[in-house]
Image: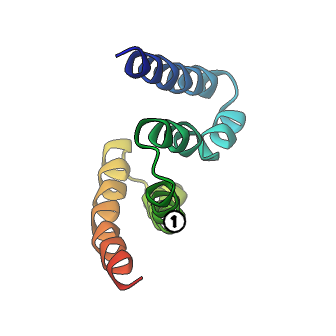
Amino acid sequence: MMLTLFKLALSAGVISFASWLSGEKPELAGFVMALPLATLLVLPFSYMEYHDAAASVKFAQSIFIAVPLSLVFFVPFLMATKLGWSFPLLYSTGLALLIGVYFFYQWICRVL
């Protein structure tokens, strides 16, 4: 129970800090969020709970495949000025692209 509370507090702290930083220094916040923060937190937590190095390696490999694919979410935002879309439309389009790329990700994981 204590480990779960610790994980919750640490994760919430990282997210809160990044959210606060985005208002103060958006470029730095973007860089911080581009770091594999979730991975840096989750990999050791997962290993501590299950003591399964092989599963942790497989987990890290799947993240390595998913990270570049997940960047598709940002494509509408990169074209925001040209498209002239509202934030909700940009965001929902990014989510739709993520859903589509998820099926491609599943296929890649099955093939590898």
In this picture the colour scheme is rainbow
- Depth check: give the residue in front, 96 or 39: 39
Say which residue appears at 28% left-offset and 62% top-offset.
Answer: 99
Residue at left 66%, top 38%?
32
Residue on which the image places disc 1: 61
Relative to 20, 97 lies left or right: left
Residue 79 appears anywhere in the view: no
**In x, y percent, where is residue 17?**
59, 21
Q: Position of residue 14 (x, y in %)?
A: 56, 25
Amino acid bearing label 1: Gln
Q: Is residue 21 above or below residue 59?
A: above
Residue 21 location, x and y as percent? Answer: 63, 24
The percent coordinates of residue 104 (x first, y second) are 33, 76
Q: 49 or 112: nearer the eye?
A: 49
Q: Secondary structure at mark 1?
A: helix
- Confirm whether residue 85 shows in the render: yes
User: Which quarter of the rendered picture does the N terminus lie within?
Assistant: top left
Quarter-of-image position of residue 96: bottom left
Snapshot quadrant of residue 110? bottom left
Q: Residue at x 49, y 36 (%)?
A: 48
